Structure formats: C-alpha cells, structure tokens
Amino acid sequence: MSAIDHKAEAERLLAKGREVVAELREAHSAGRIERADELGKQATGIWAQAQAEATLALVEQQRVGNLLALIEPEDPRSYDCWPDIREGLGLS
C-alpha cells in the first residue's frame, strides 16, 4: 500500500467508526445495553485500525521528506532517490 492508500483507508475507517457510534447511541437509547456494549467494542477496534493506517501514512510522508532533505543539487547521485519519492507520493 502506498501512503495515499493508507490515508484513504484511515478516512474510510473513521467514517465507519462514526456510523457504528451512531448505531451504538440508538441501541443505548432503546435500552439494548448488550448491543451497545458490542458496538462500543467494535468502534474501538475500528478506530485502532484507523490510527494504525494514519500512522503508516505519516511514516511514508516522513520517509519522502527525509529523501528530499538528502538531495544535494551539486551531486548527481543524490537524484537516484527520485523513483522512491515518486512512489511515496503516489505518482508512479
């Protein structure tokens, strides 16, 4: 997965977590406490996955930033990392 994929997955999971919380509130209001508890655990798991995906996206962004920081314009060898940068930005 590229950084862009991780970001999109984190956003998808956050949206899913909000849906589950809305369902949790309905279940709690209806007095279905066991169902609300089950949904709370599900939302927690979804948000943990979203956090992991967001962290992976951040790591990839940091890697690209580090590659850019290493470029020395006067040294043509420093441009060897361009394919990695393009991949990290989702351009290849």
Image (spheres, grey):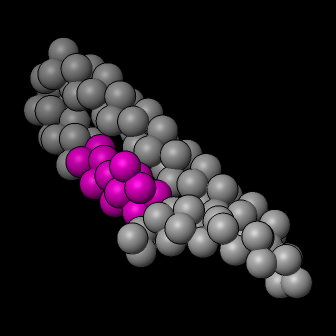
How many marks are shown on the rendered structure?
0
Q: Looking at this view, is 65 or 38 the one in front? A: 65
Picture residue at 44% right of the left edge, 45% below the top: 53
Q: Position of residue 43 (x, y in %)?
A: 31, 34
Residue that lies at the very extreme toward the bottom in this rendered image: 73
Work out whether residue 29 can be spotted.
no
Q: Please tell me which residue lies in front, 71 or 45.
A: 71
Give the camera-side residue of 4 and 75: 75
Camera sees residue 66: yes
42 sits left or right of 23 in the view: right
Residue 69 in percent (x, y) is at: 80, 69
Secondary structure character of the magenta stretch overall: helix
Is 7 displayed left or right of 31 in the figure?
right
Residue extent of the magenta highlight? 1-17
Which corner quadrant holds the C terminus? bottom left
Residue 33 at what x, y percent from top left? 20, 20
Q: Is residue 16 magenta?
A: yes
Q: Is residue 69 magenta?
A: no
Q: Quadrant of residue 91?
A: bottom left
- Please state if 2 lies on the left or on the right of 80 as rendered: left
Residue 9 is left or right of residue 20, and the answer is right
Q: Which residue is located at x 83 percent, y 84 percent?
A: 73
Image x and y of residue 62, in percent: 67, 58
